[in-house]
Amino acid sequence: MSDRRSAVHSPRTADPDAPVVVRFAALGDVVLLTPLLQALAERHGRPVHLLSSGAWTPQLLTHDPAVGELRLVTSRRAPYWLTPTQWWARRWLEAHRGAVYLCDPDPFAARLVARAGVPDGRVVRAWDHRPAQPIHWVDWWLHIAALDPPPSFGLALHVGRVSYGNVGGGNRLDFTCIGPAINLAARLEKLAAEQQRTIVASSAFAAHVPEAFAPLGEFDLKGFDARQTVHALSS
């Protein structure tokens, strides 16, 4: 029993690229979770790692071939600094590089993932994909297993005049574009990440396709005296 206890609380991982499922589930929910674990293991070609809770979880899943590493948190609602299993879970998550499937609506679960510094570009948030019509849990978990984390890039769209050409001398020439339009596009690209938007556009660009964009707001951008109206894709 001591070996099992130490394994489920270890902060180390033997496969940092494996996908991680975070689900603090009751007994019946653990049973319903197995199709998700099996589908992810088949899709990624390796066992899935699971961060969970409850004495019943290792009893049900320790010998499941779809589960590689199982880590337990004794209490996700207790204060972090008073809960060593939360410390170890955070360190365990920090060691991973693969996708994290956050399959628990509890804000404490999301807080633990955030505390580990997992970027949004690696997280699939299951509750952001709730079906409009009721479906069976198994069907929903199979849908979640087919999802990838959202794109981890920001795209800025702008239109304007630029100066361009080869810059340099001797045997080294670099093609370069300069001008206020380039500066604005660069500031918008940074703003896209800050606003957690995949695509943003300037007013100049949005004016050409008004049906595709809606105002996101006015923002102070470095290097520009006037506040800039920024647009996001219409929902």
Image: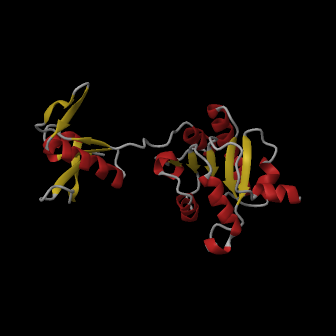
Q: State the image coordinates of residue 144 (x, y, percent, origin top left).
A: 55, 42
Q: State the image coordinates of residue 185 (x, y, percent, origin top left).
A: 22, 44
97 and 172: which one is in front?
A: 172
Residue located at (61% from left, 48% from top): 96
Residue located at (51% from left, 39% from top): 148
Q: State the image coordinates of residue 20 (x, y, percent, origin top left).
A: 63, 47
Is 192 on the left-hand or right-hand side of 21?
left
Is 89 on the left-hand or right-hand side of 140?
right
Q: Please give the count of numbered marks on the rendered protein.
A: 0
Q: Quadrant of the N terminus?
A: bottom right
Q: State the image coordinates of residue 56 (x, y, percent, origin top left).
A: 79, 57
Residue closest to the far front: 170
**Image-quadrant location for residue 116:** bottom right
Is 107 on the left-hand or right-hand side of 197?
right
Residue located at (68% from left, 71% from top): 83
17 and 8: which one is in front?
A: 17
Residue located at (13% from left, 36% from top): 162
**Image-quadrant location for residue 110:** bottom right
